[in-house]
Image (spheres, rainbow, N blue to C red):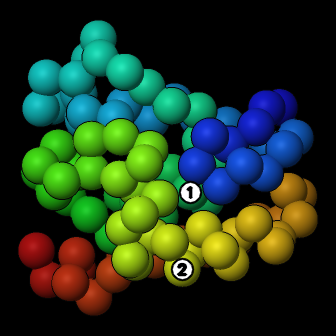
Amino acid sequence: MGTCELCGRIQVETTVHHLLPKEMGGTFGATANLCIPCHKQIHALYTNEEIAARLPGLAELRADEKLASFIKWIRKQPSTKLMKIKKSRERRRK
């Protein structure tokens, strides 16, 4: 159990998110501990190419319009709540 570095919720199960995707050369680069819903939401909204090109850090992720509304919502959810994350319509077409 830990704290999500993106949404700030405490006592949540976290996973390691490579800020530069591993397939783009980020295997040994900077990482962030994110709660599972935040981590899944990032990958549901964006391809690894998009993440590498325009979302290389936590500040950029927080400032992104689509992700900001999710973060605002998830902060209000209890850390025990499990939610289903779906790929965005744009991502499903790719």
Q: Amino acid at mark 1?
A: Cys
Vertical placement of 16 versus 56: above or below?
A: above
Residue closest to the far bottom: 89
Mark 2, residues whose alpha carbon is within 10 Å: few (<14), some, or many (≥20)?
few
Q: Amino acid at mark 2?
A: Ser
Mark 1, residues whose alpha carbon is within 10 Å: few (<14), some, or many (≥20)?
many
The residue to which callout 1 is attached is: 38
Q: Nearer the viewer, residue 1 or 56?
A: 56
The residue to which callout 2 is attached is: 69
- Say if residue 22 shows up in the picture: yes
Of label 1 and label 2, which has the lower sequence position? 1
Is 76 displayed left or right of 67 in the figure?
A: right
Image marks 1 and 2: residues in contact by CB distance under 8 Å: no
Residue visible at 10% across and 74% down in the picture: 94
Is 29 displayed left or right of 84 in the figure?
A: left
- Say if residue 48 shows up in the picture: no
